Every structure is written in structure tokens, then in C-alpha cells.
Amino acid sequence: MADHQLYMMVGLIVLGFIAVGAVAFAFLSPTMAGGDIAQKRLDGVMGPKAKGSRIKDLTAENNAQRRKQVQDTLKELERKQQEQKKRITLAARIEQAGLDWDERTFWMVSGICGLAVTAAMMLSGQPLYTAPIAGFAAGLGVPRWALSFLKARREKKFLLEFANAIDIIVRGVKAGLPLNDCLRVIASESPEPVGPEFRSLVEGLKIGVTLEQGLKRMYERTPLPEVNFFAIVLTIQQKTGGNLSEALGNLAGVLRDRKRMKGKVDAMSSEAKASAGIIGSLPIAVMLLVYISTPDYIATLFTERVGNLMLLGSAVWMSAGVYVMRTMINFKI
């Protein structure tokens, strides 16, 4: 009987320990396990919507940060370009024309041009007071006009090959080549002036110039909107990341569309340009014909002071008319 009571007491004690352990496990296990069971229960009640909402919030936050970073980069680039436009020097204009001259050489050429025109005016029997004026105008105007002409011609040649150069980068990036290797391919394979520009960019990268600084120098040498777009795409991709091949592929498409639109505009405005050229050259052509047929009739314009003033006034009005016609038919894309 005593043994039976002893067994019952042991059994009750064991059952008590089991009950206490069950209670402790029920109340303490979520805390001891780091809340995994509670989180699983919460996920089971809430379903996958809670996870999806958290992922969407994180994605929206990342997109907002990236958008803000892109906007800050664009504002910084715009500020730098505005400062650059304010300080275009004579050396920068010579470099944009593709010449290797320095400022001293340019001023020497300007002086020679002015002296040549002055000597030609004096040898042709023109009044002495007109020769220095014509020489001064020629010395200042003709070399600068030549710089503008060479700059426009160089930029036109650059745009013919620039889209193809961007396509080389797109294909190289898709094939797994680094950006610097793609730039080297363009520098060695592209014709002038695209090849030399990218060669200068690659050489600058070799000596420690950053990509942003190199692109800025390229834009200073070739101030085209297309080069500005290219610099913005590479600068933003370098700072914020993204698909470079897709961005440059879209840029190449935009450049080709701009080129196609410019061709359409030139074709549609060709008639107006021809009419303006005929109207602008008609007075000069008539004056030459009258001078050839009856030189005494028109010689008064060159020998009398009143005639000289009339020629000067006619030149001013003709210049104003040509400028107005050029402004009306010169469309910028």
C-alpha cells in the first residue's frame, strides 16, 4: 500500500513538471525563438499582401531617391554649361574650328588680312579715308567669319558619324566590353573629327581625368546638343547606375531622328533660301552689269562723297535685309 502511494506521488510530481513545462513553452517560446512563430502567424493572417506592400514601399523609395539624384545631376550639368557659355574665349573658338593655332597666330593672320585689303583699296584708287576703314573691318571680320565657317563645317562632319560611334558603344557593352575599351575602338576606327575627339577623351582618362571632366572638355571643343546629351547619359549612368546599352541605344535613335528632321526642314526651306539668295545678290549683280556696260554712269557713286554715302547706306540696308531673311529661313532643330 505504501508503495502504491509512493508511485502515485511520483506520478503527480512528473505530471506537474510536464504541466509547468507546457505552460512555459506556450508563453515563452515565441520570445525565445526571436518571434518567428508570431511572425509566421501574422503572415498567415495577413497573407502575402503585407509583404507586397513593404516591397512596393521600398521600391518607390529607391525610385524617388534615384530620381532626385538624376535631377541634381542635371541641374549641376546645366549650371556648368551656363558658366561655360559665358566665358567662350578666342582660344576656345579656334579650338572649336579644329585649328592648331594660338591667339598670337590668329592676330597675325588678322593683321595680314587687314593690311592686304588696305593696300588693295589704295592701289585701286579709292579715297584714302576709306582704305583704313575697309582694312580694319576686313582684319576683324574676315578671320572671325572664317572661324565660324570652319566650326560649322566641322560640327556637320561630326554629326555624320556621331550616331555610328554611339552604336559601337551599344554593341560593345552588350557584348561585355568595358566602356573604356569601346571608347578606344571609336578613337582608333572613326574618321575625323569623331576619332580625334574620342582619342583626346581616352588619353585624358589614361592620365587620371575623370569621365565627367573628359566629357566636359569634349563639349567645350564641340558645343553641340548631341554631345551634351551623350555627356548627360554617361554622367547619370556613372552616378546612378542603370542599363547603359539601352540608354545609349535610345540616344542613338534620337540623334538619327533629329538628323532626319533636319534634312526635312532643309528640303522644305530650300526654296525660301534660294529666293533669299537671289534677292540678296540682285543689287550687286545689277551694279556690276551697269559698271561693265556704262562705267561713267555709275562712277559717280565711287568718286563723289554723296555717292559714297549712298553706297554706305545701301550696304547697311542690304545687310539688315539679309539678316532678317536669314533669321526667317534659318531653323534650329
Image (cartoon, rainbow, N blue to C red):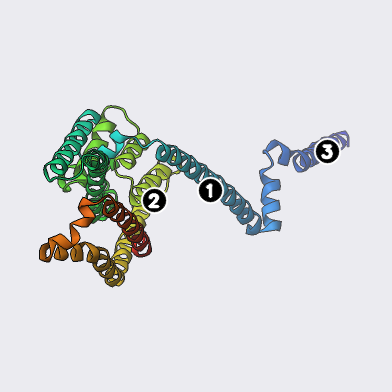
Q: Residues within 10 Å of mark 3 (few under 14, many from 20)?
A: few
State which mark lies toward you, 3 or 1: 1
The image quarter in which residue 121 lies: top left
Q: Nearer the viewer, residue 255 or 326?
A: 326
**Point 80% across, 36% down: residue:** 17
Q: CA distance from mark 3 to mark 1?
A: 64 Å
Q: Earlier in the sequence, mark 3 or mark 1?
A: 3
Q: Amino acid at mark 3?
A: Gly
- Evaluate whether residue 184 shows in this view: no
Up the image or down, 33 lies above or below 324; here it is above
The image quarter in which residue 322 lies: bottom left
- Evaluate whether residue 25 shows in this view: yes
**Point 44% across, 40% down: residue:** 239
Mark 1 lies on residue: 67
Q: Secondary structure at mark 2?
A: loop
Q: CA distance from mark 2 to mark 3?
A: 66 Å
Q: Amino acid at mark 2?
A: Asn
Q: Earlier in the sequence, mark 2 or mark 1?
A: 1
Q: Position of residue 107 (x, y in %)?
A: 23, 32
Q: CA distance from mark 2 to mark 1?
A: 15 Å
State which mark lies toward you, 2 or 3: 2
- The count of marks equals 3
Q: Position of residue 268 (x, y in %)?
A: 30, 72
Q: Position of residue 72 (x, y in %)?
A: 52, 42
Q: Nearer the viewer, residue 304 or 77?
A: 304
Q: Amino acid at mark 1?
A: Arg
Q: Which label was assigned to residue 262? A: none
Mark 3 lies on residue: 16
Q: Residues within 10 Å of mark 2 (few under 14, many from 20)?
A: few
Q: Which label was assigned to residue 243? A: 2
Q: Position of residue 36 (x, y in %)?
A: 66, 44
